[in-house]
Image (cartoon, rainbow, N blue to C red):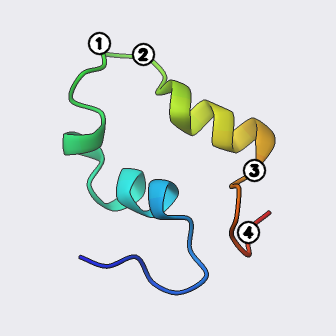
Amino acid sequence: METPPGECPQCWYHAHFSREAHAHLAPGQDCPACVDHMRNGCPGTARN
């Protein structure tokens, strides 16, 4: 699937395909990439 215009590709992928995107994490473990985006925003998108 293509990321909709104006959406951060990483955030969109992690939100809509979270089982696949987060499969490497232990139960209850935060995704470092998601935490980084929550703290620092999404680079190069309209959501900054």
Mark 3 to mark 4: distance in Å? 7 Å
Q: What residue is at 39 percent from the left and 50 percent from the top? A: 14
Mark 3 secondary-structure assignment: loop
Mark 2 to mark 1: distance in Å? 5 Å
Mark 4 to mark 1: distance in Å? 28 Å
Q: What residue is at 29 percent from the left and 12 percent from the top? A: 26
Asked if disc 4 and disc 1 are in contact, CB closer than 8 Å, the reply is no
Left or right? Give the position of 39 relative to 42.
right
Name the N-terminal-most of marks 4 and 2: 2
Q: Which numbered circle lies on residue 26?
A: 1
**Observer-nearest of 30 and 48:** 48
Amino acid type at circle 4 is: Arg
Mark 3 to mark 1: distance in Å? 24 Å
Q: Closer to the observer: label 2 or label 3?
A: 3
Q: For label 3, count other residues whose C-alpha is less than 10 Å away and answer few (under 14), some (14-19) or many (20+).
A: some
Name the N-terminal-most of marks 2 and 3: 2
Query: How far across and how far down the image is residue 8, in percent?
Result: 56, 65
Q: Quadrant of the N terminus?
A: bottom left
Name the N-terminal-most of marks 4 and 1: 1
Asked if disc 3 and disc 1 are in contact, CB closer than 8 Å, the reply is no
Q: Which numbered circle lies on residue 29?
A: 2
Q: Closer to the observer: label 3 or label 1?
A: 3
Amino acid type at circle 3 is: Gly
Mark 4 secondary-structure assignment: loop
Residue at the far front: name it: 44
Name the N-terminal-most of marks 3 and 4: 3
Residue with the mark numbered 3: 41
In the rendered view, would you say 16 is above or below 27?
below
Quarter where residue 19 is shown: top left
Amino acid type at circle 1 is: Ala
Mark 2 secondary-structure assignment: loop
Residue with the mark numbered 4: 47
